């Protein structure tokens, strides 16, 4: 009878909801909670300091001092706070942490800058399947928020950092050395780009917004000149074997295409996973579009992961899907994402 059939529908809906709930619970068990990493960080930190005290770490530190004049100058300062009048020291998950300030005399902005400090634990958990072990290269390292926790948690053994802004760089050096990570995190003060030489860096209102601009570009704000090397030249100068590199993070405020154009040798190493920010707004400041970035990426990788936590599409997708997958990204403040790029030996990866 119709009435009896109708009465069964709510029960069927309840069964489907229960099955869906169980599926969600099973999926959650497959993903590491970022709070686990936050809780592990202060426990791992003393252990990593012991690794930094080993002879091989000291040898690596001395070699880096020989090739990076900026690092040698930074560590030769008599006082740890020298050159950091425009920064404040705070504590972040048990670590001493120097934060650059664009308005050090504005108490409200200082408090806001300190309050917004955190480590990107969620991004670390999302990339662990392709970004464990070996050497990490952090291009646009800022003050070390991505690199320092990865080294302490044991995701990478050694990290080489490139940061062009002088104040960010001085904070980065202090964050490394004040936490006993010398020889494990090795920061260099330069931009990574398409050619070797110098670059123009325009200072932004936020410490994470400084960006390289073209030689002919006219912009408002302070512009400084910084040294620049291609990625291939930089690691050769450092004596880093690309075969030892496992993970490269790129966050360079619109200069991602330049980084890729100067990295032919590194891109040829298909075992290396990359994390790259995609922001059409910053790309447009260099006269580029999303297709310019995607065109540089697609020949070198087989798969990608979009780290946008709001997506419901398959997590791992073939590189051929990259262009349509990024159609949602616009030039607005919410229209950006990070993608992880990697290659597999053969065959598709099941969803």
Image (spheres, rainbow, N blue to C red):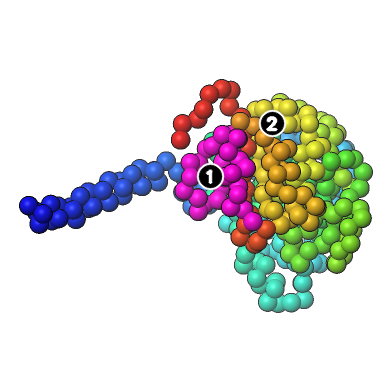
Q: Is 122 colored magenta in this rendering?
A: no
- For image coordinates 67% across by 48% down, the residue present is 277
Q: Provide the secondary structure element on which disc 2 rests.
A: helix
Few, some or many C-alpha atoms within 10 Å of disc 2 (few <14, some 14-19, many ≥20)? Answer: few
Residue 175 numbered mark, or none: none
Residue 299 numbered mark, or none: 2
Give the image location of residue 334, x and y in percent.
Answer: 61, 60
Which mark is first along the chain, 1 or 2? Answer: 1
| Quarter of the image where one finds residue 87 | bottom right
How far is mark 2 from mark 1, CA to CA? 26 Å
Give the image location of residue 3, x and y in percent.
Answer: 10, 57
| Quarter of the image where one finds residue 50 | top right
Q: Provide the secondary structure element on which disc 1 rests.
A: helix
Q: Is 325 colored magenta in this rendering?
A: yes
| Quarter of the image where one finds residue 195 | top right
| Magenta extent | 303-330
- For image coordinates 50% across by 41% down, the residue present is 315
* Residue most extreme to the front: 2
Give the image location of residue 92, x and y in percent.
Answer: 61, 59
Give the image location of residue 86, x and y in percent.
Answer: 79, 67
Residue 308 visible in the shown view:
yes
How many numbered marks, from 0 up? 2
Relative placement, left or right, of 190 versus 116 is right
Residue 39 visible in the shown view:
no
Residue 125 numbered mark, or none: 1
Q: Nearer the viewer, residue 258 or 8?
A: 8
- For image coordinates 76% across by 39% down, the residue present is 260
Q: Nearer the viewer, residue 3 or 160?
A: 3
């Amino acid at each position: 009878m119709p009435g009896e059939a109708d009465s069964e529908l709510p029960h069927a809906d309840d069964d489907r909801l229960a099955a869906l709930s169980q599926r969600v619970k099973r999926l959650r068990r497959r993903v590491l909670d970022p709070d686990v990493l936050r809780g592990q960080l202060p426990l791992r930190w003393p252990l990593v300091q012991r690794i930094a005290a080993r002879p091989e770490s000291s040898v690596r530190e001395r070699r880096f001092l020989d090739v990076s004049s900026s690092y040698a100058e930074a560590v030769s300062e008599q006082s740890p706070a020298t050159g950091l009048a425009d920064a404040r020291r705070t504590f972040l998950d048990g670590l001493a942490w120097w934060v650059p300030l664009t308005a050090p005399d504005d108490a409200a902005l200082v408090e806001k800058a300190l309050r917004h400090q955190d480590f990107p634990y969620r991004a670390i958990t999302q990339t662990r399947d392709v970004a464990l072990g070996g050497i990490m290269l952090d291009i646009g390292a800022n003050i070390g928020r991505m690199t320092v926790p990865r080294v302490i948690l044991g995701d990478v053994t050694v990290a080489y950092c490139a940061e062009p802004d002088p104040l960010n760089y001085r904070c980065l050096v202090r964050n490394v050395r004040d936490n006993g990570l010398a020889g494990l995190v090795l920061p260099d003060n330069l931009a990574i780009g398409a050619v070797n030489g110098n670059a123009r860096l325009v200072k932004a209102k936020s410490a994470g917004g400084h960006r390289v601009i073209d030689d002919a570009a006219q912009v408002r704000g302070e512009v400084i000149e910084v040294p620049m090397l291609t990625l291939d030249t930089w690691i050769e100068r450092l004596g880093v074997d690309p075969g030892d590199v496992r993970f490269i993070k790129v966050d360079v405020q619109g200069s991602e295409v330049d980084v890729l154009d100067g990295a032919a040798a590194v891109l040829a190493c298909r075992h290396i996973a990359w994390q790259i920010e995609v922001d059409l707004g910053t790309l447009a400041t260099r006269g580029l579009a999303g297709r310019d970035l995607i065109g540089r990426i697609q020949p070198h990788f087989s798969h990608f992961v979009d780290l946008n936590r709001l997506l419901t599409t398959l997590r791992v997708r073939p590189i051929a899907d990259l262009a349509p997958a990024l159609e949602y990204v616009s030039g607005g403040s919410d229209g950006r994402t990070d993608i992880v790029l990697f290659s597999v030996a053969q065959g598709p990866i099941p969803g």
